[in-house]
Image (tube, helix red, strand yellow):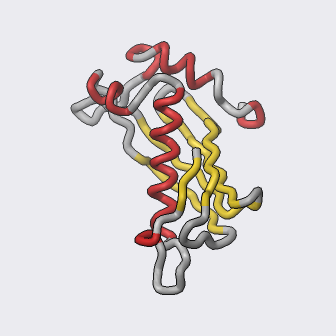
């Protein structure tokens, strides 16, 4: 997906504020889920929630107002309860950011959900996309 840096996302130096990269990760993750046919809204309507467990981020180069950042999402790991998503952000081919987020799957009561039991079609779609280097 592509994200165009907005003026309100920059600080007084004209650089995209570091907190915005976290928002861009979420935008890209939601876009990815839409693309594979499992929008968050659908999952939540079926009683499955996926909160963030942890994040790791690397800011490599700054982005400024008007830059168009290309964001690539990869599935780096999935065990049916926890998924690890990788993010690569590039500007004109140069990497500006890399990061990962881990998410757990919970039901409405906050208990872990085994996705193979609850949404086997989701598991199949995700397992097809796990990066070969992360198997």
In percent of the image, x 64 and y 61: which residue is there? 97
Specify the quadrant that holds the C terminus: top right
Task: Report whether 42 appears left or right of 117.
Answer: left
Q: In the rendered view of the protein, which quadrant contains the N terminus? A: top right
Instruction: Please tell me which residue lies in front, 131 or 33.
Output: 33
Relative vertical location of residue 91 with respect to residue 2 in this rendering, above or below? below
**82 lies above or below 98:** above
Q: Position of residue 89 (x, y in %)?
A: 64, 55
Residue 7 position by quadrant:
bottom left
Q: Position of residue 54 (x, y in %)?
A: 48, 52
Residue 123 position within the rendered picture, expressed as x and y whole percent measured from the top left: 52, 20
Q: Nearer the viewer, residue 56 or 7?
A: 7
User: Is 38 situated above or below 55?
Assistant: above
Which residue of the protein is positioned furthest toward the bottom in this rendering?
Answer: 12
In front here: 76 or 72? Answer: 72
- Farthest-out residue, left: 109
- Judged left or right of residue 134, residue 81 is left
Residue at 48 percent across and 75 percent down: it is 10
Q: How many marks?
A: 0
**85 displayed left or right of 131:** left
Residue at 53% from the left image edge and 85% from the top image edge: 13
């Amino acid at each position: 997906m592509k994200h165009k840096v907005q003026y309100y996302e920059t600080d007084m130096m004209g650089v995209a504020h570091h907190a915005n990269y976290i928002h861009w990760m979420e935008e890209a993750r939601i876009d990815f889920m839409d693309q594979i046919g499992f929008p968050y809204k659908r999952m939540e309507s079926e009683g499955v929630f996926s909160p963030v467990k942890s994040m790791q981020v690397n800011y490599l180069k700054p982005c400024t107002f008007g830059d168009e950042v290309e964001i690539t999402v990869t599935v780096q790991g999935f065990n049916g309860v926890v998924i690890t998503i990788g993010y690569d952000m590039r500007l004109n081919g140069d990497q500006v950011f890399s990061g990962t987020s881990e998410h757990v799957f919970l039901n409405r009561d906050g208990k872990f959900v085994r996705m193979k039991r609850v949404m086997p079609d989701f598991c199949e779609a995700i397992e097809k996309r796990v990066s070969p280097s992360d198997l």
